[in-house]
Image: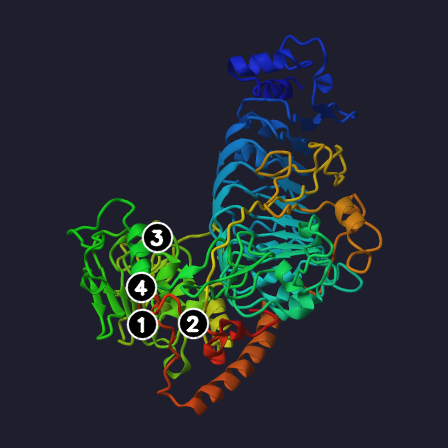
């Protein structure tokens, strides 16, 4: 017991620590009370071993002591809403009996160490400054115990590990407001108890997996999913119609992405996202689908109702566009590009891009056709620094884009799919992430799509590989080779000192591997991407995505989901003030609690009774037929993908091998009379992005 006492006292650090301890019972080597009587300490009565430490909202300024790794009987550690700093000691996460770990709303930094306890039920490290990636095996040690995993509002990066799908009792997965990139793992659809899925405000790309609507064994009549937050990412494709099969869905947000098409009408209802519009007058004329996302060629700062149309000088091909529409004028686009790529000053070798008197076609590296349309931009090795703006993809005649060997950072924008590119080179830069799947499907760029072969590597070699040209070519030696360098984290690498596969055992697994992504792209290789002439108007609304309080732990040996334990306002674990912020329309977004959802939502769209407050009474999902069985499902899905591919190949063959992808035919706004209005009849239906197709494949 003396050893445990000394371990506990390691929390009292410096003058601030002594001042804090002086206002608490115990917490001193000279304390008269036994350790089990100290504030925040609970012991096992049979042997006086420490089982629980609860020090929340106590203005404690300290680090988490590594010495606490000696408390082998510790089951509950709750230190939320303090001033904790430093890293999370791996000695603490290695505790063998830990069931609740809650350090939310502090100032902790560094990586999130793996947890050794197979009994871990709640892990909440939200609202800190954690960095690094999540371990790829994160779901393997807690397959039947973890019910809540919350790391929202940190600086975590990497991909979302597909091993989350092994957590058969996981009810809440909250990864929002981080820097995660890559694809949404389709295997998340196999989680039978999942109710709250928050992936908003990240850098995720690719499609929304239709498998999320898979009927799980958690409910009698289907999936338990009630809240799905995907807003403010870079997701592409369309919203799967299968999302309407989630009959318990209360909130679904997908605005602020690169989604096209239309919101499925079966998904639009008065109850969906109703809390977001609770202050809207009952007699207001509101299009129900606008509650999910504003339609193509409309915009709102919220991305949802009320939506405003774009005017004739701007355009928006995406659903749920936030902010403002995209200017179509070539000069404005290239000026935006220069602004975004000159963050460290003017480009190397001098440039005339910042000279307002220089004609557009006289810009360094720019080539125009006879009609003064920009068809080439070659700026390789010019010292560009910054990011590639989305607007660049809206140069309607751009065929060649060479930005290689520059200090460009960020991610490769999927918006480049809209330009009629024949050649794209971003090799030798510092772009991260993956090639957006919709860009992988772009026919003709770098020979992509020849003979039906769509390959992301023709756009750029993926991170962890390299090639002589930074991408796959048609020559025998032009391929992407695995690289074992520690800094092999960028797209389009052209050099490598150690050839081989880099050890990524401690890193996230990427969700889908290259082969999985290739399968996905083959399945949807028939997507025809085009855009055309639209009208645009700016909207001015402020967006505050307020999350409802996540379920919190209460009790020592059992976990009770009560949002009021730590924050009486019911808005805990949020990067905002306790008073919910509201937009100009009086709306707000909150994450749900068991009681909120049960009381607010009609029985027709939610269960008649609220879930049991004790997560472990849900029951463990034992020897299920593993819905994520890779061998069995891969065989079934490959048959479906093969069938879809055969149909698409036949369709393409009927059009002939020389058919070119459609090109936009909208006029340059500067060449148009300002008074001229563009009628909707000018639309070519085949070029309407509302018609963009995304094949619903159960698992990709």
Q: CA distance from mark 3 to mark 2?
A: 27 Å
Residue 373's place in the image compared with 162, above or below, is below
Based on the displayed image, in which of its 4 quarters is residue 415 positioned?
A: bottom left
- Residue tagged 1: 397
Q: CA distance from mark 2 to mark 4?
A: 14 Å
The disc at residue 533 is 2
Q: CA distance from mark 4 to mark 1?
A: 10 Å
Q: Is residue 203 left or right of residue 658?
A: right
Secondary structure of the residue carrying numbered label 3: loop
Secondary structure of the residue carrying numbered label 4: helix
- Residue 14 horizontal/vertical position (percent): 51, 15
- Residue 556 horizontal/vertical position (percent): 75, 32
Q: Nearer the viewer, mark 3 or mark 2?
A: 2
Question: For this rendering, which residue is in front, 561 or 466?
Answer: 561
Marks 3 and 2 close (CB-CB < 8 Å): no
Q: Nearer the viewer, mark 4 or mark 1?
A: 4
């Amino acid at each position: 017991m003396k050893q445990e006492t000394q371990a506990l006292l390691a929390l009292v650090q410096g003058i601030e620590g002594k001042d804090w301890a002086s206002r608490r019972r115990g917490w001193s080597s000279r304390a008269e009370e036994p350790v089990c009587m100290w504030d925040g300490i609970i012991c096992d009565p049979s042997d006086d071993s420490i089982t629980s430490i609860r020090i929340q909202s106590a203005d404690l300024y300290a680090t988490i002591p590594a010495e606490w790794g000696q408390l082998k009987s510790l089951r509950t550690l709750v230190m939320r809403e303090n001033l904790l700093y430093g890293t999370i000691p791996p000695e603490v996460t290695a505790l063998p009996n830990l069931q609740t770990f809650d350090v939310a709303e502090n100032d902790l930094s560094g990586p999130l160490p793996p947890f050794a306890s197979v009994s871990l039920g709640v892990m909440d490290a939200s609202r800190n400054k954690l960095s690094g990636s999540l371990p790829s095996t994160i779901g393997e040690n807690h397959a039947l115990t973890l019910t809540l995993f919350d790391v929202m509002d940190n600086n975590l990066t990497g991909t979302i590990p597909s091993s989350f799908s092994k957590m058969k009792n996981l009810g809440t997965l909250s990864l929002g407001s981080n820097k995660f990139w890559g694809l949404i793992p389709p295997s998340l659809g196999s989680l039978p108890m999942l109710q709250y899925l928050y992936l908003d405000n990240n850098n995720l790309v690719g499609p929304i997996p239709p498998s999320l609507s898979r009927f799980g064994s958690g409910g009698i009549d289907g999936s338990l999913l009630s809240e799905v937050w995907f807003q403010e990412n870079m997701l592409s494709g369309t919203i799967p119609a299968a999302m309407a099969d989630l009959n318990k869905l209360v909130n679904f947000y997908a605005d602020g992405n690169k989604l096209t098409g239309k919101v499925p009408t079966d998904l639009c209802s008065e109850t969906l996202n109703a809390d977001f519009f609770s202050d809207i007058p009952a007699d207001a004329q509101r299009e129900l689908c606008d509650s999910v996302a504003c339609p193509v060629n409309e915009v709102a700062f919220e991305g949802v109702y009320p939506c405003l149309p774009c005017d004739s000088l701007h355009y928006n091909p995406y659903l749920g566009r936030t902010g403002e529409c995209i200017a179509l004028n070539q000069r404005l686009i290239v000026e935006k590009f220069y602004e975004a790529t000159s963050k460290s000053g003017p480009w190397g070798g001098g440039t005339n891009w910042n000279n307002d008197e220089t004609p557009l076609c006289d810009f360094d590296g720019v080539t125009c056709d006879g009609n003064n349309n920009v068809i080439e931009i070659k700026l390789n090795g010019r010292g560009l620094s910054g990011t590639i703006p989305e607007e660049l993809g809206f140069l309607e005649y751009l065929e060649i884009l060479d930005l290689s060997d520059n200090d460009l950072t960020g991610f490769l924008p999927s918006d480049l799919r809209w330009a009629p590119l024949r050649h794209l080179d971003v090799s030798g830069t510092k772009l991260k992430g993956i090639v957006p799947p919709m860009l992988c499907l772009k026919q003709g760029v770098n020979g992509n799509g020849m003979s039906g072969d769509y390959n992301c590597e023709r756009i750029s070699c993926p991170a962890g590989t390299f090639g002589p040209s930074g991408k796959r070519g048609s020559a025998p030696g032009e391929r992407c080779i695995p690289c074992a360098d520690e800094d092999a984290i960028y797209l389009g690498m052209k050099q490598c000192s150690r050839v081989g596969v880099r050890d990524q055992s401690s890193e996230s697994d990427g969700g889908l591997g290259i082969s999985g992504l290739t399968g996905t792209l083959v399945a949807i290789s028939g997507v025809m991407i085009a855009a055309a002439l639209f009208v645009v108007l700016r909207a001015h609304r402020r967006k505050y995505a307020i999350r409802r309080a996540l379920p919190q732990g209460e009790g020592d040996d059992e976990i009770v989901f009560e949002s009021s334990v730590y924050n009486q306002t019911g808005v805990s674990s949020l990067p905002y003030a306790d008073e919910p912020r509201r937009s100009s329309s009086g709306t707000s977004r909150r994450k749900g609690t068991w009681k909120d959802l049960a009381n607010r939502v009609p029985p027709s769209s939610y269960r008649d009774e609220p879930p049991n407050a004790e997560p472990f009474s849900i029951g463990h999902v034992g020897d299920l037929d593993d819905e994520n069985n890779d061998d069995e499902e891969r065989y079934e899905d490959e048959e479906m993908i093969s069938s879809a591919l055969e149909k698409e190949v036949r369709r393409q063959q009927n059009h002939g091998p020389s058919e070119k992808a459609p090109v936009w035919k909208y006029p340059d706004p500067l060449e148009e009379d300002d008074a001229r209005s563009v009628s909707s009849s000018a639309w070519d239906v085949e070029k309407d992005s509302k018609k963009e197709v995304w094949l619903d494949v159960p698992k990709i």
